Image (tube, helix red, strand yellow):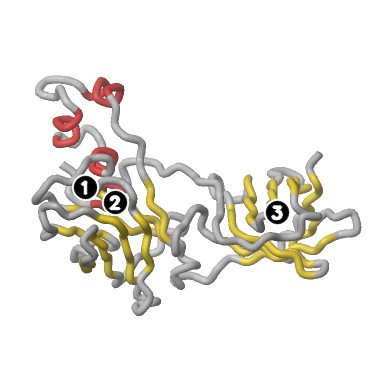
Amino acid sequence: MCASALAVIACFALPATSAVAACERADAALAGAYAGVVAKTAPRLQLNQDGSFRMREVPMPGMDVAGCWQRSGQTVVLVERAPDSENGLRRKLPPPLTEADLNEVRGDGIGTLQQAVDAGLLPPGAWWAHRLRRPGETLRLKVYEPRYGLAVGDAKALLRLADGRVVEQSAVQGADGEFEFDALPADAAVKAIGVRFPEQPDTPRWLTVDDPTKLLYLIEFDAQATGAAEGGVMTLTVQADRSLISDFPDATHFKRAP
């Protein structure tokens, strides 16, 4: 059986998300879709009136870039931000296991999903993240940075319970970003998950939880928002035809898509 949350996180792929919160409204005249004019791979840029943007088909495969944008004179500034985050945190859920998954591993002594998970034949993360915590069971939390693989470091994890109590926990020794809460009250109901990052120890970040308490929570963090890395910034120059040219070194020319 897979006992660590780090092993759990490696057992499934995480889907991409699409929206960016907390952007200020931007110049409606430049909002729209743009296509990069380059020899091979052409990045695509979408500027939205709500101030959010998304750039697809960037050089890193599968790495769309999203964030907020604003215009100042003839300059457009793109600032990368994590999509769908709350205070720099975002919860991820793997797809739940199904009978089709069980049929792939069904055999002698393996007739249920629980048996398949216990035998290490199916990823426990996809099981625990959807399974309700029962009295006395250990609640697991995995905090990780999905984009660059940055270490969490000496962070603290917090749970805010329905009765208002806050429980704080250090990481499992030798396991970066893995936390185990094994002394929770039998009737504990988690209403929010917090992380106190070493870069900002006096400012815990909270993520609201609005469903019944699970055995495992997978929490992504935005390295820029938490101070673990400097934010990505890209500037573009507005041309007379309202096309955009990115700054040095790539100088990609973005033209309005038809």
Task: Residue type at mark 3: give it.
Answer: Gln
Residue 101 placement: quadrant: top left
Q: Secondary structure at mark 2?
A: strand
* Residue 53 percent coordinates (x, y): 64, 54
For the residues bearing labels 2 and 1, Cβ distance under 8 angstroms: no
| CA distance separating discs 3 and 1 | 40 Å
**Number of the label disc, if any, that sits on residue 66:** none
Residue 69 placement: quadrant: bottom right
Q: Residue at x 35, y 79 (%)?
A: 202
Q: Residue at x 29, y 56 (%)?
A: 191
**Number of the label disc, if any, that sits on residue 49:** 3
Q: Secondary structure at mark 3?
A: loop
Q: Quadrant of the N terminus?
A: top left
Q: Quadrant of the C terminus?
A: top right
* Residue 249 percent coordinates (x, y): 71, 64
Q: In this picture, is 92 found above or below 100?
A: below
Of residues 80 and 3, the one drawn nearer to the viewer in this rendering: 80
| CA distance separating discs 2 and 1 | 7 Å
For the residues bearing labels 3 and 1, Cβ distance under 8 angstroms: no
| CA distance separating discs 2 and 3 | 34 Å
Q: Secondary structure at mark 1?
A: loop
**Number of the label disc, if any, that sits on residue 215:** 1
**Number of the label disc, if any, that sits on residue 217:** 2
**First reached walking from the N terminus: tag 2 or tag 3:** 3
Q: Residue at x 33, y 50 (%)?
A: 210
Outermost residue on the front side: it is 163
Outermost residue on the bottom side: it is 202
Outermost residue on the right side: it is 240
Task: Residue type at mark 1: give it.
Answer: Leu
Question: How packed is label 1: few (under 14 Cα within 10 Å), some, or many (20 or more)?
Answer: many
